[in-house]
Image (spheres, grey):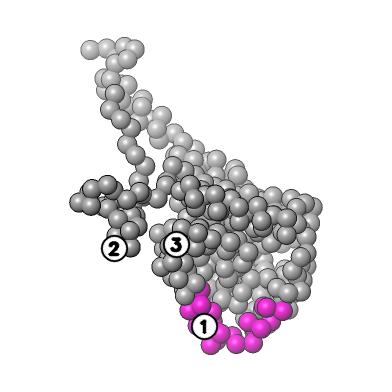
Amino acid sequence: MLDGPGSFGPGRARATRSSGRAPAVVGMVAAVAGWLAIVLLTEPFGREWGTGQDARAYWSSALSDPYRFSSWGEHGAYLYSPAFLQLVSPLALLPWQAFVGAWCALSIVALRALTGSRWLALGVVVAAMELAGGNISILLAAAIVAGFRWPAAWAFVLLTKVTPGIGLLWFALRGEWRSLAIALVATLAVVAASVLLLPGAWGEWLTVLGRNAGRDGTWAAVPLPLWARLPVAAAIVAWGARTDRRWTVPVAAMLALPALWYGSLAILLAVLALRGDAPARPATNPAAGADAPDRAGRPDVSGPITEPSPAPA
């Protein structure tokens, strides 16, 4: 039988499968091409249209003197906690170009987790500046999304950019004290372990934070100071917590960045991962299974997050 209009024969099925795979293929091609271009353009470092400007600080900063360069806007300035540098230090043993390749690949994996295969090409375009520069915005977005299931992931946010931790208001305003406690205890545990190895560096980091507080971004940042953005970020989280809109958390975290770089808009890709993903409501029937409330009256959302299936025609 011929495959006419409205037919669901083998030819139509193959065409449907092919069109469904096309975005994934385009996304993979874009990711691989972008990765290759970024790696090739890292050498020689510092040239016009070069890459890895932000990642250079992670690679070049020494554990013995991590804050040798730590003034806002200074070339190669390292401004995150000692714990982040300790985490990255094994990777920093690689030659510069290999380091950029590994770091960019890690960011692309995080990007794929946020966008899925269907929207990966869009993600590569939106996050192009962050991928090229090697900043951590994509990893921050992934940590925020993961933090709904594994609150300990917030330690990454608090020990790098710090102020996007305003997203933890989500747990506080919803009375999810266990999740909030896990996030804070995990952060303190990382700090404690790091202090044992680099005790002096933590005092230096606090000094660096104080010295750079209130500094505005450069031409590459949205000209809105942090003090003006923080109340807006808090209000967005509060609204989202009251209305079960998880996607408001990455929006607020982005607004609460110390400097709102244009490339940091890539954090909004976390919205793709959280779209339509509202916390489950307590079931009216206590025997309703996975959606039934736990002993504290909260719904059980420990299972995998899935999107609802379309209703049958």
Find residue 295 and name its label. 2
Percent across and percent down for residue 154 are 50, 65
At label 2, which amino acid type do we have?
Answer: Arg
Q: Is residue 196 magenta?
A: yes
**What secondary structure characterizes most of the magenta part?**
helix
Mark 2 vs mark 1, CA separation in Å: 33 Å
Label 3 crowd (10 A; few <14 / some 14-19 / many >=20): few
Mark 1 vs mark 3, CA separation in Å: 27 Å
Residue holding disc 1? 192
Of labels 2 and 1, the one closer to you = 2
Secondary structure, mark 3, is loop
What span is in magenta? 187-207
Find residue 175 and name its label. 3
Q: Is residue 204 above or below residue 283?
A: below
Residue at coordinates 43% horizontally, 70% vertically from top-left? 182
* Mark positioned earlier in the residue sequence (2 or 1): 1
Percent across and percent down for residue 231 are 66, 56
Secondary structure, mark 1, is helix
Q: Is residue 247 magenta?
A: no
Percent across and percent down for residue 206 are 68, 78
